[in-house]
């Protein structure tokens, strides 16, 4: 589908030797915008019934059936230390391919757009805050005057 | 053609032969006079030698050759079996196993010559009359093959030779080379005939030049032949040596051969040739019956031999074969993917079923009938696939008697292993994994369990300790028990050790039940052996056993009585992928409970629930059964009011029972188990998930973990 063509475009652009660029899907959690590297995204689906698993940390909402595969779903909000999800028509589950955990779904408030950021628009965060929220963020992207926090996908684990 | 493609077969067979040798030599030790055992040993050793030779593993060949010499002396009665000799033979087997392992990992046998062993073997030989080797050659040339000889004889005379081949043969005969006809009969139950045939070709080619084969080499390679094939070869070597080389290949029933006389060939026009008429009679009268045939051909296979008759055009008519056990070797991965497909099919079937029940009003009965039929078919299909994957645990446990024998010598304790239920079947993947844990438990019993001879005498126990290994099927589980009549677990020793190690505090220790104490043994790095031996006692083992068994979705328990003995019980699920389950509702969630652990379903009035030690129990047909309210365990609100009747699912694990209180029953369903991956560990009573017909996910409750 589109993803593969997008990925291809990214590669094409890289191959051209032009300034290196990355594509991010911009999502909304509460008032803030976050970016997820498009290469890590498997698929995006609408909210669907989640089967709860007892005795799990609260952010692990349960499991869903993704084309015959049972995959866990995490509340991005709770993981970031925000309040409970408010389900709306815009709520989506983004399924990410993580190296350690395999496919994992994340509940987000809204999927807004795809942006292309060049290297000099991405600023790596060097400070090491103890706040859990920032531990998942490793860079900030500047786009049309907005700031987009970029997720460090390697930091997302299913453990408490 | 390249030998490497036969490496797999070679390894498989070598292992089989080695295991066979292990078992038989053990038998030989207890019953030195049994001719059947000796013959069997001889045959296995001989095949091993032949295979190793063909594959070019010279060291392995040398060692087996010397072993074979010893066996042949034993068979001829020139050497008496004694314990020292058995020890040497076992060491040889270990060395052979080492070669095999090397070959498996590097395709090379390694550089160890094992000269010491070969020397010991020769000492055994020389310690007795050294005349055996020659005698053995003749001894087994047995009568039964003689009567078949007539019909098998001179098959090469019906091969169609073209002019150039005739010229070659004539030329060779003029040069004083020998021209032989060979007929190779492959055993009836042989699976890879083409591979065998190839090995025969290869063996023969080392000694001779193959001029023609019937069927053609290509057909033979494509397995387009029945049970035998015929060769005409040129050679400087003796006929006997060629026949022996061909017979060295395993699963060859017999090889016959004789010098070829062109005049006897049905396709040869006598008019073309006159000068060699002198030797005309030689072809029919020389018949070399295979000396191995008596030993290697199964008795049932022998009468079938004459069934093959050559037709005039050189092709053979399809003979009527007696039905034998026909098998196919299949890669386990193919079975896995087959299993996955069956799983998908069952999920699809479940969605059909749920779709049809939702729209019951407008579905006709024919549709429902077909759905029911489909259900039957998928269930049968699933069972068949399951059965294909099942193998007897024999392949794993058959090495244990040998191990116990070794341990007995090493630990200087007399002990005997009794096994039952070796034929119990388990999923192949489980069988592959279960060997190590069982070995640990047996070693444990031998080392820690059984007392020293003095202590046994004091306690009035028989001098020879007994270790039992029993396997049997129990519902949806397979149970394997390792039992000994030894010391049992010294609860106090474990308790003190745990306190000393700081694993538990003295206060904790005082409150722990015997069972809790015993469970401490399964903690990593916990050993009570007063003395560390190289058999056990290093504190690795029981925790490994436990984690291995649990990774197979099984569990291990121990019961022990101090001074009397211990019983270790391993309980494994029969299937890993698809089970029959009862679907239940708790709160507003659906759960599946494996039918295998369910005893009965009960409707209990709320007033029948009694309190014992502040725990809810019910009386049921004379038994007191503790109640587990699933809604509490699963943190959901029950939809039922307090004074309504309870729906109780009675589940059983071993001799323990419990009643699971649920809100609603849905019914029985075949479910496909999907792993929850690493979450299972966080929630121990959920063993997986399954996808229901409507795409919804239900969790599978592990009743065993709840009890």
Image (cartoon, helix red, strand yellow):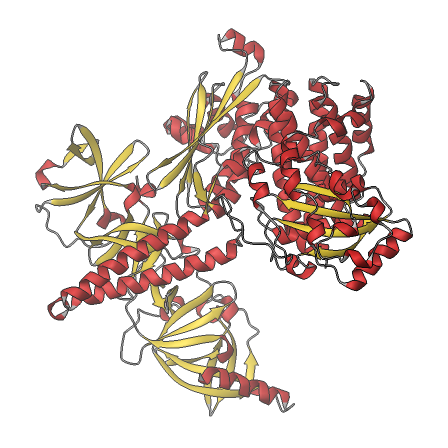
Q: Quadrant of the N terminus of chain B?
A: bottom right
Please name whichever residue, B35 or B677, is drawn nearer the observer in this view of the structure.
Answer: B35
Please name whichever residue, B135 or B180, is drawn nearer the observer in this view of the structure.
Answer: B180
Determine the residue positioned at 82% across, 22% down: B131
Q: Is residue A94 above or below residue B443?
A: below
Q: Is residue B503 above or below residue B550?
A: above
Whole-percent x and y of residue B55?
74, 48
Asked if one can make out residue B682 in the rendered structure from this viewpoint, the answer is no
Q: Is residue B456 above or below residue B539?
A: above
Residue lying at the far right in this picture: please name it: B175
Q: Quadrant of the C terminus of chain B?
A: top left
Residue lying at the far front in this picture: please name it: B271
Determine the residue positioned at 15% across, 32% down: B619
The count of marks equals: 0
Determine the residue positioned at 74% across, 23% down: B73
Whole-percent x and y of residue B522?
48, 35
Asked if one can make out residue A106 in the rendered structure from this viewpoint, the answer is yes
Q: Is residue B155 left or right of residue B555?
A: right
Q: Is residue B173 left or right of residue B675?
A: right
Determine the residue positioned at 45% across, 35% down: B423
Whole-percent x and y of residue A109?
34, 77
Please name whichever residue, B249 or B224, is drawn nearer the observer in this view of the structure.
Answer: B224
Q: Is residue B277 left or right of residue B474?
A: right
Whole-percent x and y of residue B94?
69, 34
Q: Is residue B444 above or below residue B242?
A: above
Q: Quadrant of residue B39?
A: top right
């Amino acid at each position: 589908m589109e993803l593969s063509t997008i990925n291809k475009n990214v590669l094409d652009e890289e191959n051209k030797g032009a300034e290196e660029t990355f594509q991010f899907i911009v999502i909304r959690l509460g008032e803030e915008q976050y970016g997820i590297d498009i290469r890590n995204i498997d698929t995006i689906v609408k909210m669907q019934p989640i089967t709860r698993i007892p005795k799990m940390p609260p952010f692990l909402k349960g499991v869903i059936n993704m084309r015959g595969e049972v995959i866990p779903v995490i509340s991005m909000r709770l993981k970031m230390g925000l309040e409970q999800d408010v389900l709306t028509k815009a709520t989506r589950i983004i399924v990410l391919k993580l190296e350690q955990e395999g496919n994992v779904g994340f509940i987000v408030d809204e999927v807004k757009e795809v942006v292309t950021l060049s290297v000099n628009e991405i600023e790596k965060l060097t400070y090491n805050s103890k706040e859990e929220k920032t531990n998942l963020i490793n860079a900030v992207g500047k786009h049309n005057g907005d700031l987009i926090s970029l997720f460090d996908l390697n930091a997302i684990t299913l453990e408490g | 053609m390249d030998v490497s493609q036969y490496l797999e077969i070679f390894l498989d067979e070598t292992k089989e032969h080695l295991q066979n040798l292990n078992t038989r030599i053990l038998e030989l030790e207890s019953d030195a006079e049994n001719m059947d055992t000796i013959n069997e040993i001889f045959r296995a050793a001989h095949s091993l030698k032949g295979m190793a030779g063909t594959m070019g593993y010279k060291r392995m060949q040398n060692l087996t050759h010397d072993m074979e010499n010893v066996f042949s002396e034993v068979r001829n009665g020139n050497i008496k079996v004694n314990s020292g000799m058995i020890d040497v033979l076992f060491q040889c087997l270990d060395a052979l196993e080492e070669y095999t392992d090397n070959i498996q990992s590097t395709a090379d046998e390694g550089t160890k010559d094992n000269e010491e062993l070969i020397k010991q073997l020769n000492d055994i030989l020389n310690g007795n009359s050294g005349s055996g080797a020659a005698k053995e050659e003749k001894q087994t040339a047995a009568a039964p093959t003689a009567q078949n000889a007539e019909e098998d004889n001179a098959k090469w005379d019906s091969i169609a030779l073209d002019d150039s081949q005739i010229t070659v043969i004539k030329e060779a005969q003029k040069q004083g080379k020998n021209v032989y006809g060979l007929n190779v009969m492959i055993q009836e139950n042989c699976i890879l005939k083409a591979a065998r045939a190839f090995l025969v070709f290869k063996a023969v080619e080392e000694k001779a030049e193959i001029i023609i084969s019937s069927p053609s080499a290509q057909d033979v390679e494509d397995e387009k032949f029945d049970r035998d094939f015929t060769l005409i070869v040129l050679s400087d070597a003796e006929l006997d040596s060629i026949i022996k080389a061909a017979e060295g290949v395993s699963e060859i029933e017999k090889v016959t051969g004789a010098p070829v006389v062109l005049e006897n060939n049905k396709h040869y026009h006598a008019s073309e040739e006159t000068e060699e008429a002198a030797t005309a009679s030689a072809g029919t009268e020389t018949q070399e019956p295979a000396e191995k045939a008596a030993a290697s051909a199964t008795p049932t296979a022998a009468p079938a031999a004459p069934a093959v008759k050559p037709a005039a055009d050189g092709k053979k008519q399809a003979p009527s074969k007696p039905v034998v056990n026909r098998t196919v070797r299949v890669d386990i991965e193919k079975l896995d993917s087959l299993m996955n497909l069956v799983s998908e099919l069952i999920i699809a079937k479940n969605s059909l079923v749920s779709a049809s029940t939702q729209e019951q009003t407008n579905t006709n009965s024919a549709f429902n009938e077909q759905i029911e039929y489909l259900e039957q078919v998928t269930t049968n299909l699933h069972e068949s696939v399951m059965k294909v994957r099942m193998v007897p645990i024999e392949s794993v446990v058959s090495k244990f008697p040998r191990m116990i024998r070794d341990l007995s010598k090493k630990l200087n304790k007399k002990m005997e292993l009794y096994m039952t239920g070796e034929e119990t079947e388990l999923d192949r993947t489980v069988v592959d994994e279960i060997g190590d844990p069982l070995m640990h438990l047996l070693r444990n019993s031998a080392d820690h369990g059984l007392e020293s001879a003095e202590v046994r005498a004091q306690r009035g126990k028989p001098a020879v300790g007994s270790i039992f290994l029993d396997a049997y099927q129990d519902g949806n589980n397979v149970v394997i028990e390792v039992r000994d009549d030894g010391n049992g677990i010294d609860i106090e020793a474990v308790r003190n050790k745990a306190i000393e190690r700081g694993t538990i505090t003295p206060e904790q220790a005082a409150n722990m039940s015997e069972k809790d104490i015993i469970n401490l043994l399964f903690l990593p790095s916990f050993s009570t052996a007063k003395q560390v031996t190289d058999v056990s006692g290093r504190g690795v083992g029981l925790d490994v056993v436990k984690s291995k068994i649990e990774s197979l979705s099984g569990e291990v328990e121990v019961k022990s009585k101090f001074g009397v003995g211990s019983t270790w019980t391993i309980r494994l699920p029969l299937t890993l992928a698809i089970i029959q389950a009862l679907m239940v509702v708790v709160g507003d969630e659906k759960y599946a409970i494996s039918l295998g652990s369910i005893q009965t379903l009960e409707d209990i009035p709320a007033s029948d629930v009694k309190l014992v030690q502040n725990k809810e129990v019910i009386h049921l047909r004379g038994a007191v059964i503790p109640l587990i309210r699933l809604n509490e365990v699963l943190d959901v609100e029950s939809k039922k009011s307090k004074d309504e009747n309870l729906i109780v699912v009675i589940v059983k694990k071993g001799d323990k029972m419990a009643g699971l209180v649920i809100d609603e029953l849905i019914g029985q369903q075949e479910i496909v188990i999907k792993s929850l991956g690493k979450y299972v560990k966080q929630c121990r009573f959920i063993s997986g998930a399954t996808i229901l017909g409507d795409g919804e996910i239900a969790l599978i409750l592990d009743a065993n973990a709840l009890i």
